[in-house]
Image (tube, rainbow, N blue to C red):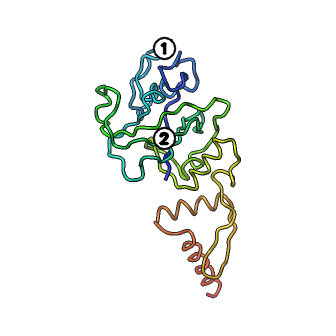
Amino acid sequence: MGMVIRVLYNNRGWQSPCNDPAADALCQKCVREDSHLNIIRPSEGDKVCSGLCWERDLCSNYEWGSRRRFGDSAYRGAKVFFVFRQPGNRYTLWAATTIDAVNVPPIRRLTDHEAEYRFWIRFSPFKPLPEDKWVKDLRDIDLVGEQWRQGMYRFIDPAKEAELERLIKGGVSEKPLGSSPGILPVRGNAVSVSLAPSVYDRLQRAARYEGRELEDIIKEAVAEWLRSREG
């Protein structure tokens, strides 16, 4: 089980406050009003950001906090991928590392607005990939297999983890990101079904919502179709 964490962009390599945030298009999420960010915003006219966020020292303190205790899906040795949101609601994958410790005290001295974050993950030391190696224009479904609204991290299955690792290494995904794998087997009589990507994605969402297997939903749809034909 891997983990994807979305962070704010930092134009100093995630090691120090951003330079001239108002002039950097990728810093605009911090500059403009956004009620979902628990940060201290830069001041107008800052040449060096006077705000405060975890991202400014992510690649020196190597830690990430949560209000709630991390469960068993976060464990020492698990792979972690870091992304930031581009303009247009796409993502850039810019680094990866592994978890070194879970539910530990922070290294940092917490400020008042951080006091509620009591549970921290510590990462193995890492640096950003060279910018020409960043993987850009990813959708949330490409990263975590579903729409990603609230929350700053998601856990992913081994297949998605392997897919992101290939992308970081410069490889090509074995299937188009966010699309159907092509053939969906239906067990029983060795029937297989080829689905359009949009149909497959809709089936996945329905299956997750109802807590069912895709194969069961397809079998039920076929049975309903047969009954309608016979009636």
Please report the residue visible at 42 percent of the width from the left and 16 percent of the height from the top. 50
Which residue is at the front of the view, 170 or 29? 170
Q: Hey, which residue is sitting farthest bottom in the picture?
A: 230
Q: Residue at x 36, y 39 (%)?
A: 120
200 shown above or below 117: below
Question: Which quadrant: the C terminus?
Answer: bottom right
Which of disc 1 and disc 2 is earlier in sequence? Answer: 2
Foreground pick, 79 / 151 = 79
On screen, 179 above or below 51? below
Q: Position of residue 151 (x, y in %)?
A: 43, 43
Which residue matches tag 1?
48
Q: Position of residue 168 (x, y in %)?
A: 63, 41
Q: Cβ–Cβ below 8 Å for labels 2 and 1?
A: no
Q: Nearer the viewer, residue 19 or 228?
A: 19
Q: Residues within 10 Å of mark 2 (few under 14, many from 20)?
A: some
Determine the residue positioned at 47% across, 48% down: 78
Amino acid carrying mark 2 in the image: Ile
Residue in the image at 57% along x and 63% along y: 203
Mark 1 Cα-neighbour bin, 10 Å: few <14, some 14–19, many ≥20: some
Separation (CA) of disc 2 from disc 1: 25 Å
Q: The residue tagged with tag 1: helix, strand or loop?
A: loop
Q: Position of residue 155 (x, y in %)?
A: 47, 50
Q: Secondary structure at mark 2?
A: strand
Q: How many marks?
A: 2
> Circle 2 is placed at which residue position?
5
Quadrant in the rendering for residue 167: top right
The numbered disc on residue 66 is: none
159 relative position to 37: left or right: right
Name which residue type carries label 1.
Val
**Quarter assignment of residue 181:** bottom right
Residue 118 coordinates in the image, percent (x, y): 30, 38
